[in-house]
Structures are given as structure tokens and as C-alpha cells.
Amino acid sequence: MLPSAERLRRQSLFERAYKARMVINADAFSLYVVPRRPATGKSLLPLAGFVVGKKVSKSSCVRNRIKRQLRESYRLVRRSFELNQLYALVFVIHPQALHMTWDQLNSALLSSLDRAKKKYCSNLKA
């Protein structure tokens, strides 16, 4: 489980991520990114939120299971990426994720975090 300090909980931050339209698309999910303001010199990890709509599955058990799997995958790799220039990450999970294995989810997560780091962190070094 992610520590409480690294969880994205406020609805306003979710909406801010959606409005920013900084998106990395993968088969299993879409990753919305909110950059950190450049004045912050802290090396904090970004807040992470996971969203699964009822269109993905009507069963809350299935929705929660896929969120737990993706959350655990993120927890295991979050320190290996230097994502301190990002403020928030919102994972919107697609129906294809239900049919993926753990290794496929993990590789999709790794590639999307790598793409987000290259695309959005390099632009912030002004």
C-alpha cells in the first residue's frame, strides 16, 4: 500500500490533472500528469491516484482488484524513477487492463512512467 503522504485524494487535484491534458496513453490505462512548480526544490515523490469507472466493470470487487494490482506495481517502481518534478499522477484504468497479466501491467506501467519522465520532466528544467 502506498503511504498516506503519496496518495492523491482531493477531487480538485484530479480535476486539475484532467484539465492540464498532459496525458500518456497505454493499452491498460491513461496516465495524466501534473507538473510541480519550478520554485520547489524538494525531492518529493508525486502524489498518485488510481481511477476505475463503472464502465470498466460493474463489480466493485473487480475494479478494486485491478486498482490494487496497479497500485502495488507503482509502489514497487516509484523510487527507481526520478519523478520529483511531477506533482501528481492519475492513472485512469481501461477495460483492457482486466485481461492483462501482472507482467504485462508492470511493463505498461514502466514504459508509461519512462515516457512521462522524458516528455514532461525534461521540459521543466528551465
Image: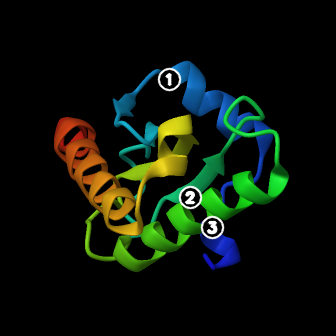
Upstream in the sequence, badge 2 or badge 1? 1
**To which residue does mark 2 refer?**
47
Q: What amino acid is at disc 2?
A: Leu
Question: Label 3 neighbourhood size at 10 Å, few (<14), some (14-19), many (20+)?
Answer: some
- Measured as percent of width and height from the top left, residue 17 is found at 56, 32
- Residue drawn at (65%, 72%), measured in percent from left and top? 5
The span from disc 3 to disc 1 (Cα, nearest Å) is 26 Å
Element type at mark 1:
helix
Task: Say which residue appears at 40% left-offset and 79% top-offset.
Answer: 76
Please determine whether, in this image, residue 103 is positioned above or below residue 122.
below
Q: What quarter of the picture does the N terminus occupy?
A: bottom right
Q: Which residue is mark 3?
A: 68
Determine which quarter of the picture holds residue 125: top left
State the residue position of label 1.
20
Point out residue 35 in the picture as x, y percentages from the top left corner.
Answer: 41, 41
Write down the quadrant of residue 55 in the picture: top right
Residue type, numbered disc 1: Ala
Taking the image as shown, residue 62 lies to the left or right of residue 27, namely right
Check the image and report above or below for 85 versus 72.
Answer: above
Front disc: 3 or 2: 3
Horizontal side, residue 107 vs residue 12: left or right: left
Q: Secondary structure at mark 3?
A: helix
Residue type at numbered disc 3: Arg
Q: What is the crowding at mark 2: few (fewer than 14 residues within 10 Å), some, or many (at least 20)?
A: many
Residue 58, numbered label: none
Mark pair 3, 2: CA separation: 16 Å
Looking at the rendered structure, the secondary structure element under dot 2 is strand
Nearer-the-camera pick, 113 or 124:
113
Front position in the image: 14 or 124: 14
State whether residue 26 is above or below residue 15. below
The image shows residue 13 at horizontal and vertical percentages of 67, 39
Marks 2 and 1, Cα distance to the nearest angstrom?
16 Å
